[in-house]
Amino acid sequence: MLLDEVVRTSQAVASTPARSAKVASLAALLRRLEGPGEAEAAVAFLTGRPRQGRIGVGWATLRAVDPPAAGRPSLRVLDLDAAVAALGACAGPGSAAARHAVLVDLLGGPPLPRPTSSAASCWATCARARSTASWPTPWPGRRPSPRRWCAGR
């Protein structure tokens, strides 16, 4: 089942005050689901609580993916459920890039940019400058981070 059907059902339930119409919309959706795994995932998305719990993805992470607009709905409930499980499994060093890769795969956004040689050169220059005693700093008594220095801020 497409996630779009779950979203439309949720909107229909939210837009009507009649309990019988809410029950009818939810019952029709539940009858169209294909198997218990899809039913569990769809109900979890309807309630706003994924089965996997907290997964470490916030609005800033989603904003960074910046997917193109879909011409028509194509995201399936089980595909989203699997992606949420994969996002929840990302932990430790490199987990932010791994989460970004899962989201790009799911939503089709651009991949993370690769560091350029000029950026690598800047970091190397900053690292060398930081190790010397003649660090030019406008902040007496402390050194700024190399990132701030390279960015020109």
Image (spheres, rainbow, N blue to C red):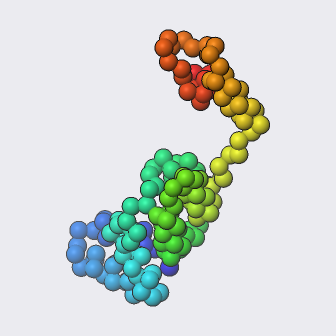
* Vertical arrangement, residue 20 with respect to residue 84, above or below: below
Nearest the viewer among 69 and 78 is: 78
User: In the image, 12: left or right of 74?
Assistant: left
Q: Position of residue 114 (x, y in %)?
A: 71, 45
Q: How many marks?
A: 0
Q: Position of residue 133 (x, y in %)?
A: 62, 16
Determine the image quadrant of residue 13. Answer: bottom left
Q: Position of residue 77 (x, y in %)?
A: 49, 74
User: In the image, 131: left or right of 90?
Assistant: right
Q: Is residue 62 visible to us here?
A: yes
Residue drawn at (28%, 77%) of the image: 21
Residue drawn at (57%, 14%) of the image: 137
**Screen quadrant of the C terminus:** top right
User: In the image, 37: left or right of 48?
Assistant: right
Residue drawn at (50%, 58%) of the image: 91
Q: Position of residue 52 (x, y in %)?
A: 40, 69
Residue drawn at (50%, 76%) of the image: 78
Q: Is residue 33 visible to us here?
A: no
Nearest the viewer among 145 and 3 is: 145
User: In the image, 88: left or right of 124?
Assistant: left
Nearest the viewer among 67 and 117 is: 117
* Vertical arrangement, residue 116 with respect to residue 12, above or below: above
Determine the image quadrant of residue 36. Answer: bottom left
